Amino acid sequence: MSPLTVPVGDPASLESLAAVYAYPEQVAAGRPWLRANMVAALDGSARLEGLSEGLSGEADKRVFGVLRALADVVLVGAETVRAEGYRPARARAEFAGARRAAGQEAAPAIAIVSRGLELDLSAPLFTGPLVRTVVITTEDSPAEARRAVAEVADVVVAGERSVDLREAVAALGRRGWTRLLTEGGPRLLGGLAGAGLLDELCLSVAPLLTGGDGPGILRGAGIPGAQHMRLVSLIEEKGFLFTRYVRPASAGGSTG
């Protein structure tokens, strides 16, 4: 399959992008598919002045919105939630009909991976989401903090001393959430890739040289050897490149 090119600025871009980034058919049969959406500079840095926001642009935000609009749940690390000031996902009128037809809720849930539960429970992520936020933690997480979180979010325990990401993904799948999207950060993405859970990477490349020492998109993966990915689409807009790579084993129907 040759990579597709789509003009992000096209008047029908939302529809075109939704087609390019459509989840594979097996999700309808209950097989979870985990894709990551990350942004990086030309020199590989995933942050500018400490945040990924500095690397973004208009077209990148459009792709970001479409990927969220297609997902059942967004999986994100607590460090990224704190640093980026995460808010609940919003419902988008352009995708309302398609989400209803697919049996999806009005907006994706946000699922936070957090061992220490150092979360601002007064933030909109907990006080005003369209879909109740999920917090994935460990058996040895602070009991008092876990009770407080449980009052404003659904708590999922996966693992004893560190979050078992395989169990975390399986728990989301048991809720009927098969269209999974992770937005990192680098440590969570590293763990997911290292556990063989990452089916797809949507990487936006910003036309910037940061000149800094920020982390890359993936950290601490522990992947046993190089992991090959297959390019399935490529979009260019104002110097930004929007790539979509799929793990060959995933494309062949394997769960990895």
Image (tube, rainbow, N blue to C red):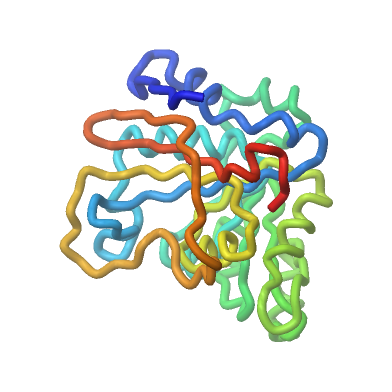
- Specify whether residue 130 is in view: no
Q: Is residue 123 above or below residue 240?
A: below
- Rendered residue at 53%/37% (across/down): 67
Q: Nearer the viewer, residue 52 or 210?
A: 210
Q: Is residue 165 left or right of residue 204?
A: right
Q: Would residue 76 appear left or right of 216 to someone viewing this image?
A: right
Q: Is residue 22 left or right of residue 209?
A: right
Is residue 22 among what the camera can see? yes
- Residue at x 30% of width, y 29% of height: 236
**Placement of 124 over or under 177, stated as above or below:** below
Q: Position of residue 248 (x, y in %)?
A: 59, 42
State the residue lying farthest toward the front.
225
Task: Determine the image quadrant of residue 33.
Answer: top right
The location of residue 235, given as percent across then percent down, is 36, 29
- Viewer-proximal residue among 158 and 143: 158
Residue 214 % position (x, y): 29, 67
At which x and y percent is residue 71? 63, 39
Image-quadrant location for residue 191 = bottom right
Q: Which quadrant of the structure image shows residue 252?
A: top right
Q: Is residue 140 left or right of residue 189?
A: right
